[in-house]
Amino acid sequence: MALQEFVEELDSLSASAHQALTSATNEEQLEEFRVEFLGAKNGRLKSAQKLMGSVGKEDKPAAGQKLNETKKLILGAFDDAKARLLSIEADVLDPTFDPTLPGKKYRLGRIHPITQTIEELKDIMGRLGFSIAEGPEIEDDWHNFEALNIPGEHPARDPLDNFYLSVAEKSGVSDAGVGQPTLMRSQTSTVQIRVMENNPPPIRVISLGRVYRPDTADATHYPMFHQMEGLMLDVDVTMADLKTVLRLFATNYLGEDVTIRIRPSFFPFTEPSVEADYFWNGKWVEFGGAGMVDPNVLQSVGYDPETISGFAFGLGVERLCMRRHSITDIRALFTNETRFLHQF
Ligand code: DAH
């Protein structure tokens, strides 16, 4: 047989294979194709292979190559057709599949409103140039009281107002704090001290986190809540800067040009101390304490109060979140009732 003839034979074989495959619409037809074309004994591909014997010796390499190509083409097309039919069967030909049925509804979780508030506060304060600082929730006497100008006999240390833990024991690593009481921190002002101990001025940080006080839970109290602490220290920081930051914060968070007012107050760690209110929905609402950092505090961390000044503030996160969403009972934020949480 001439090479030319052999090639034509194979071309027509692959053309008819292609045609058979494209018109196959089910598995039986595919099986018929397999027997007719790929059958090991009498398949048409096998017969074509036998024709090789009659091709002249010098044409054998070319004929062999052609045979291999044709085989590859047909097997490839067969696999494609198989995959096509399988996917059609799975999707459409499955008699139990009803595309008109409603889909499965997956209940998506949501971010807790307190976490949402914290993220928003970080965002607003970030735009005012404040970065984030963190501190531990189990604190020692020094950071929760002493360094904040709250000496030994101060009523803020009352065991009825604090969750005291055990006295710190020797850990084997260092003697720092050994013999001192530890407690669940009662305020995030502790982080002010930790930041100042580890960084030279200027400082502009906020710290958001949980604080703990043994209050009985009611609509406005909970034994654990969140605070946002702010601290800004530099040369020549004044009360005007404090007021500006508080006002920008309030207008950003409440989304309108709210008026704020500050009233004289007292905190051991600030001098002078103020309480800040904003006018919102026809009422004055208290939103936190603030003041100029007391020179005693600056000294306790080794800063020079003659050259460095600054302000600090502490706001209740729950209170801000509750005002914003008109939530009237703080306990709703901690009972994890999904019907409540799904609203935010
Ligand atoms: N730590 C105070 C509290 O828990 C709030 C506070 C008041 C924080 C004045 C401050 C501040 O940084 O300057 O009630």
Image: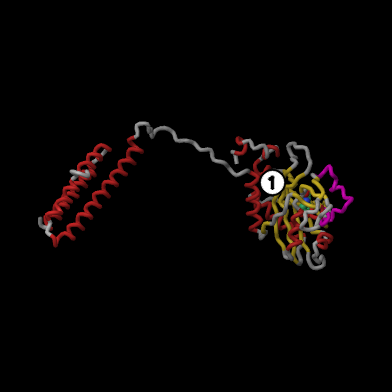
Residue that mark 1 sits on: 320
Front-most of residues 266 and 109? 109
Residue drawn at x 10%, y 57% as measured from the top left: 2
Total numbered badges shown on the rendered structure: 1
Residue 88: quarter of image? top left
- The part of the chain drawn in magenta is 145-162
The reply, left or right, for residue 105 in relation to residue 14 is right
Residue drawn at x 68%, y 42% as measured from the top left: 322
Q: Quadrant of the C terminus?
A: top right
User: Can residue 232 be seen in the rendering of this structure?
Assistant: yes
Residue 81: quarter of image? top left
- Residue 99, image x, y percentages: 38, 34
Mark 1 is on which residue type? Answer: Leu
Color style of the picture:
secondary structure
Badge 1, how many Cα within 10 Å: few under 14, some, many 20+?
many
Residue drawn at x 45%, y 35% as measured from the top left: 103
User: Can residue 289 be seen in the rendering of this structure?
Assistant: no
Front-most of residues 58 and 28? 58
- Residue 217, image x, y percentages: 75, 37
Front-most of residues 291 and 96? 96
Callout 1 secondary element: helix
Q: Is mark 1 within 8 Å of ligand 1?
A: no
Q: Quadrant of the N terminus?
A: bottom left
307 in magenta: no
Front-most of residues 334 and 87? 87
- Residue 95, image x, y percentages: 34, 31
146 in magenta: yes
